Amino acid sequence: MKIPEISVIVPIYNEALNVEELNKRLTSVLDATGQPYELILVDDGSQDDSWSRMMALGGSRVCVKLSRNFGHQIAVSAGLDRARGKTIVIIDADLQDPPELIVPMLQKHREGFHVVYARRRARIGEGWFKRTSAKAFYRILDRLTHIKIPLDTGDFRLIDRMVVDQLRQMPEATKFLRGQIAWLGLRQTAVWYDREPRTNGSTGYTFKKMLDLALAGITGFSDQPLRMVSRLGFGISLISGILIAYALYQHFVSEATITGWTSLILSVAFFGGIQLLSLGILGEYIARIHSNVLRRPLYVVQEEHATP
């Protein structure tokens, strides 16, 4: 089987309404390049008829059906495990990221860049909360991590074979691919675009999934939350010591015992909240360690079909 120059990985979750249009636009762009290519479509446990529509498509493609919904990052990882091309493009199936942007990405790759990521200039059609929370997340992550993860970028990007080979050597179970790619270094650049509104269906990225991704990014690439817990604990201990000394002084020296149930309850509630927050942060890191120690496979493939 001829090795393709370009592999395009598409994670799919409940995108039956977009599969045909996506395939049409992708094949139009890739045919125009004149280079051999393959489409790798990964069905991440869809509940609609995405799988049957994937199987009905023509052209050189690999269709992978995971046994359940493992998550976007794992579905992309399943595609990376099967990609044979010298350059690999990761793109979502919702058509908010235009396939036509692959052309300038390929041009940047020919100029010698190992990674070409699509950077959002605007997020058209998205609500205030989604835009604000996404913007805040990228900037908080930038402040917390010691590596520079590009702002306002998702997983829509082009990477070359060297990057894929390195990613496949990273064993962590909790994936945050854009952080892993940034960690590698190499030559990286951006192509700017305006993100289009979704035309069909609804997003599978719920608030919980976005929060899980944010936690994966922070715990995977920053130890600052742990350091903050240590500093917070030291500061509170210092304040508590001063308050205890003051209370003892008032009782034994000034003979004026400090009273007040309200202040006592507020103090207990405050310190209890701090302790629970600290335990929660520690728990996130312990959970990450636990998932990696188990060494379970990242995903389970239910069906897989390839056409030349």
Image (tube, rainbow, N blue to C red):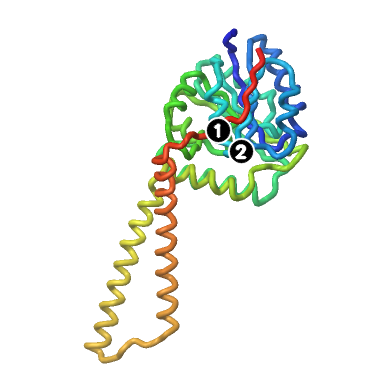
Classify 10 Å Cα crowding around label 2: few (below 14), some (14-19), many (20 and above).
Answer: some
Residue 53, quarter of the rendered image: top right
At x 64% / y 37%, what residue is drawn? 45
Numbered mark located on residue 300 in the image: 1
Direction from residue 137 to residue 295 in the image, left or right: left
- The single residue placed furthest to the bottom in the displayed view is 255
Direction from residue 100 to residue 159 in the image, left or right: left
Residue type at numbered disc 1: Val
Numbered mark located on residue 39 in the image: none
Which residue in the structure is indicated by mark 2? Answer: 68
Classify 10 Å Cα crowding around label 1: few (below 14), some (14-19), many (20 and above).
Answer: few
Foreground pick, 111 / 258: 258
Reply above or below: 28 against 211: above
Residue type at numbered disc 2: Arg
Q: Position of residue 154 (x, y in %)?
A: 58, 35
Foreground pick, 215 / 120: 215
Q: Position of residue 139 (x, y in %)?
A: 51, 45
